[in-house]
Amino acid sequence: MSDRYLNFANTPAGRRLVGALGLPSPLPLERWVAGRNRPLEGALLIGGDGDLGASVAAFANRLTDEYFAARDDQYGLPRWTAEHGPKLKGLVFDASGLSRFEELDALRQFFQPALKNLGRCPHVVVLGRAPQTLDDPQASSVQRALEGFTRSLGKEIRRGGTVQLVYVDPGAEPQLEGALRFLLSPKSAYVSGQVLRLQPCAQQVSDWTRPLAGKTALVTGASRGIGAAIAETLARDGADVVLLDVPQAKDALDALASRLGGRSLALDICAEEAPGKLVEALAEGVDIVVHNAGITRDKTLAKMSEGLWESVIDVNLRAPQQLTAALLQAGALRDNGRVVLIASLSGIAGNVGQTNYATSKAGLIGLAQSWAPTLAERGISINAVAPGFIETGMTAAIPFTIREAGRRMNAMNQGGLPQDVAEAVAWFAQPGSGAVSGQVLRVCGQSLLGA
Ligand code: NAD
């Protein structure tokens, strides 16, 4: 669905009017396009004082053609200055060495000149150490403080920019490249203000042009909307895809499956025979399972019937749990598998008329958190992706004024696209992304709602 306000606000007359009235001024976001091979097209500046900056500098040439350090003699890279350096497209600041309150000013010193010299749609990543892993209270507090910094910078950066905080555990440095290939590229166009933790993971991507080659991926609810985009993106990245949707959606499902060279499976995930049929269809094994199928049946709780309540819990929560359990029990989900649950911002912030939906989506986040430690024994990761307002048939059905409010209430003043959710899922699906488990990644343009 097209965002007519965004299109208008980016015409010369629209820009004048929007500026004069002080209205939101969304910028068209830069997204990944087929054929591109560099994560970052433009200059990358690396700075900070910890050990992680050097790890990033070591693979900077695989991220972009132009990379600089903030100081002379740092990482053996050329120095960037505000006076002579190019406009910046990516910033990585290693804050892992900060442990005293007075050292936090290093953030201001690094970012001030850089922020005045940003290109369009820049991507910023701050690196740190997980506060809970540090014994010294002040050091732990300083690392926790980075959250407030990055979330605020995300709201200030404008120009279609994104800002994230990545805590890197000792031993997880090899997984930084995969994370930065996502977080510094247009693949994370609509992801901002997020905090992630990387832990050591034995798996690695061997071919960055097809990171999912040799993997089989199941996507539920794949005939349209976000599910279709996920199937397309996983196939683009080299996975053999199995597309599942209700029998009523069989024609669209078959058409997409044949275009992607995948298989289709017409099945209602709530049907009694669903676990058995799924195990049978995936008897040869599956590496990536994306629980995307979902429904809304909105009513305020006072008017909510048992049927509306149960149907949403069944599709959105019970079925993903039962199907995952069945795949695990049958041994169909392979070692080092990747499970991704599509939750929702409603499951984090709550929403009027969505007690059933928000309950189911918060429950999915709980599933990711509770299952992660057990699945880790087999190298399997499980994470939730929580979309905010995404332009699909589901959001097109929302009444105009509520839809318009939902769309603008984020740092980017616009809705995301199915592709934005799909790119996050594709990153979680990679072998090296076993470094992230039991976590939630919001794809919400840094919504003003929720944490
Ligand atoms: P959509 O309605 O366009 O697609 C959902 C798909 O799930 C449909 O193809 C549908 O047939 C399928 N499905 C529903 N019940 C099923 C069942 N019992 N068995 C098998 N398939 C079933 O929705 P969408 O906007 O693409 O949303 C996809 C996911 O993203 C959902 O889980 C939704 O809750 C979540 N989400 C969407 C948004 C948004 O803004 N669109 C925001 C947050 C979360």
Image: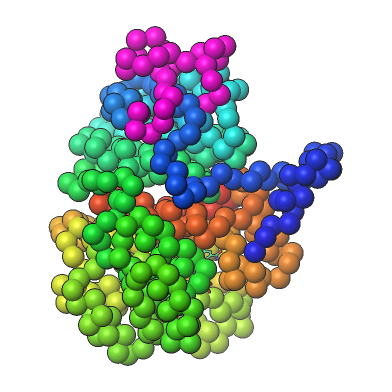
Pick the front one: 298 or 259? 259
Residue at image point 20% right, 71% down? 285
Q: How is the image coloured?
A: rainbow
Pick the front one: 99 or 88? 88
The total of numbered circles placed on residues is 0
Q: Residue 62 magenta-drawn?
A: yes
Residue at image point 50% right, 57% down? 419
Residue at image point 35% right, 28% down? 61
- Give, as a single range, the part of the protein colored magenta: 60-88
- Which residue in the rendered view is the most extreme toward the top? 72
Residue at image point 52% right, 16% down? 85
135, above or below 22, in the image = above
User: Looking at the figure, which quarter contains the N terminus?
Assistant: bottom right
**Looking at the rendering, which quadrant does residue 371 occupy?**
bottom left
Residue 380 located left or right of residue 151: left
* Residue 169, horizontal then vertical, whole percent: 26, 38
Q: Is residue 56 visible?
A: no
Pick the front one: 180 or 259? 259
Q: Is residue 84 visible?
A: yes
What type of secondary structure mainly makes up the magenta span? loop
256, above or below 314, in the image = above
* Residue 307, horizontal then vertical, whole percent: 51, 88
304, above or below 378, in the image = below
* Residue 284, horizontal then vertical, whole percent: 18, 74
Residue 157 located left or right of residue 332: right
* Residue 176, horizontal then vertical, whole percent: 31, 38
Q: Residue 50 magenta-drawn?
A: no
